[in-house]
Image (tube, grey):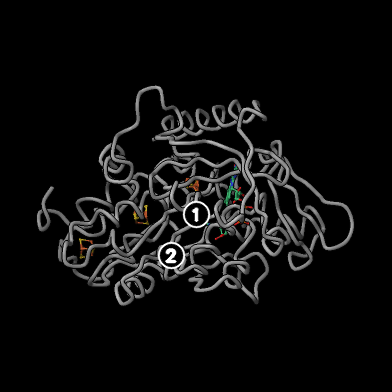
Amino acid sequence: MGVGEKGFEETLKPEVVEKGFCAVCGACVSLCPFGVIELRPSGPELVDNCLKCGNCYSVCPRYELDAEAIERFAFGRPRRPDEEFGVVRKMLLARSRDEEVLKVCQDGGVVSTLVKHLVSSGMAIAAVLSGVSLDTPWLPEPRIAINGQEVLECAGSRYSYTLNLMSNVGTSALLGFLEGRKAAFVGLPCQVAAMRKIQMLPVEELGWHKAFGPIIGLFCTETFDYDGLVKLMREKLGLEPGDVVKMNIKKGRLYFYPREGEPKAVRVKELADLVRQGCKVCTDFSAELADISVGSLGLEGWNVVIIRSELGEDVFNSALKADLLETRPIEEEPQVIDVLRRLTEMKRKRGEKRS
Ligand SMILES: Cc1cc2nc3c(=O)[nH]c(=O)nc-3n(C[C@H](O)[C@H](O)[C@H](O)COP(=O)(O)OP(=O)(O)OC[C@H]3O[C@@H](n4cnc5c(N)ncnc54)[C@H](O)[C@@H]3O)c2cc1C
Ligand code: SF4
Ligand code: SF4
Ligand code: SF4
């Protein structure tokens, strides 16, 4: 489809928003050069005349996502039929050796360690991350980190959605263009897919692919409504959100760790009403289009790392060479592959059933 033939009303509105497929990621709003779409809780809405430039649907992860074209662009080849988790160069277990990261990270701290290394060494000009509000406990918000301290402030997982792609993309791209260096990006699979489409936008003189990379993806089953999580903490668990220091999903339960006392947990199945609509049609568990994908799959203090691209391998090896990470073969935890397979299949089936 060529630019100028179709606009928002012929594409995203009927095919994504009205069908309930929208991930509410904000990429379309962020990339509309004329500011004529605004993000609402159920997705973007047209608020002025669409000039049919084509940007919004070109970057949408839920509209004509050509995974094979992205794989050729990012990995130099499409996945083979036997690659059930997407293109994989290497899969291994890893954890940080950085004491500062280990104090604040979610699992093994691989993500913060890689990003801290990228911005501290100057390999990246900045990193587009998800942080947390200073005033409202557990409210995730987009951040641009330009040094190690700012990376540490974003460590840990928040299980509600951040509009990383909304307010950060333009600013970090500008930084990249000005400095001639790329901004790293950390995000959930839907955000990774949007970032790939942004990198592939055919704007030669700007070259979005020159502005972003590496793209680090997090494993993701779903995200929950923020207000619903707060209500649950207060009303069902008797916890004040400001007193909760960590949340973690393990063996089908979401655990809340208070500053003092024992953790409290709810079964993830009981949170079905809090799952965002766009997550119910999502088919990507392990961020299959990222340079490096990271999760924990229930391991304590370790990460499962999937290195997918040459760039991802270079970044990971650079951190290894700087003695920032320790690794183990994935074969030492054989159950991990079964869990990855189960969650990958569960998401594909759940998403395909509903779409
Ligand atoms: C919503 C969500 C669901 C997840 N589901 C699973 C799962 O089902 N199974 C599994 O194995 N792993 C899951 N993960 C990944 C896991 O929680 C860890 O992020 C991952 O193991 C990396 O650990 P780490 O110690 O290296 O991270 P850290 O070094 O602590 O770094 C975490 C990074 O995550 C980013 N981040 C935090 N919250 C969000 C958010 N809401 N949106 C986008 N980015 C965020 C921050 O930018 C930070 O840089 C999920 C993560 C999130 C955010
Ligand atoms: S990005 Fe272009 S096609 Fe999309 S809403 Fe804006 S003007 Fe219309
Ligand atoms: S999925 Fe993202 S890019 Fe697509 S319509 Fe929804 S908000 Fe826009
Ligand atoms: S399940 Fe995760 S990756 Fe998929 S739409 Fe929801 S937040 Fe995005």
Q: Which residue is mark 1?
A: 318
Residue 51 falls left or right of residue 33: left
Mark 1 or 2: in front is: 1
Image quarter for ligand 2: bottom left
- Look at the numbered discs 1 and 2 and tell me whether their residues touch, using CB distance below 8 Å: yes
Identified by mark 2, the residue type is Met
Q: Which residue is mark 2?
A: 123
**Residue 159 vertical position relative to residue 87 in the rendered view, above or below:** below
Mark 2: few, some, or many residues within 10 Å (few <14, many ≥20)? some
**Residue 292 vertical position relative to residue 68 in the rendered view, above or below:** below
Q: Residue at x 67, y 44 (%)?
A: 302
> How far is the residue under mark 1 from the one under mark 2?
10 Å
Residue lying at the far right of the rendered structure: 261
Q: Residue at x 80, y 60 (%)?
A: 239
Q: Dot 2 lies on which element? A: loop
Q: Is the distance from the Cβ of mark 2 to the nearest ligand 1 atom less than 8 Å? A: no
Q: In the rendered image, which quarter contains the C terminus?
A: top left
Q: Quadrant of residue 160?
A: bottom right
Q: Is the distance from the Cβ of mark 1 to the nearest ligand 1 atom less than 8 Å? A: no
Q: State which tag comes first along the sequence, 1 or 2.
A: 2
- x, y percentage for residue 70? 29, 43
Residue 182 falls left or right of residue 52: right
